[in-house]
Image: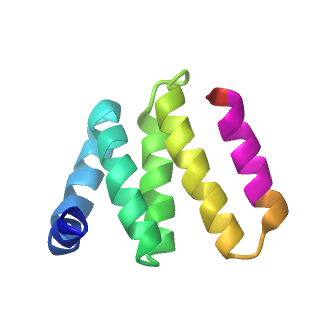
Amino acid sequence: HESHDWLRREYANLAVATRERFEQGDGETLATLAGSYARFLFEDGFWSECENVLTMAEQTAPPDSAPVRIVTLGLRGAMARRRGQEAEAERFWLARLALQ
């Protein structure tokens, strides 16, 4: 996957950009980064880094930002499932469905 290869090459730059956007309170850009970057981190097994990106996105997003919550809840549900926490995964996914 070409975009996945690009993300792998740019991992360090994306980590810095994500942190800078968070520190500047740039929720809009961070939300965009969170969608692809957090998914990349999740898929490659960098779960704690993924959790950090999701948390930053949630903290800088407007409270009524359904698109950000949909992404973060979906990935949090997927991580919970991979950890064998089925009830926790279901809780995240039900919350996500309520927003869609």
Residue under the point 76% across and 75% down: 84
In the drawing, does residue 43 fall left or right of residue 76?
left
Q: Position of residue 1 (x, y in %)?
A: 24, 69
Which quarter of the figure has residue 12? bottom left
Bounds of the magenta segment: 89-98
Between 27 and 76, the one nearer to me in the picture: 76
Asked if residue 44 is among those painted magenta in the image, a careful observer would answer no
The majority secondary structure of the magenta stretch comes to: helix
Q: Position of residue 34 (x, y in %)?
A: 37, 49
Q: Position of residue 23 (x, y in %)?
A: 30, 44
Establish if 46 lies above or below 86: below
Asked if residue 90 is among those painted magenta in the image, a careful observer would answer yes
Establish if 53 lies above or below 62: below
Which quarter of the figure has residue 100? top right
Q: Residue furthest right?
A: 87
Q: Position of residue 42 (x, y in %)?
A: 46, 68
Which quarter of the figure has residue 8? bottom left
In the drawing, does residue 94 fall left or right of residue 59?
right
Q: Residue furthest top?
A: 64
Establish if 26 lies above or below 74: above
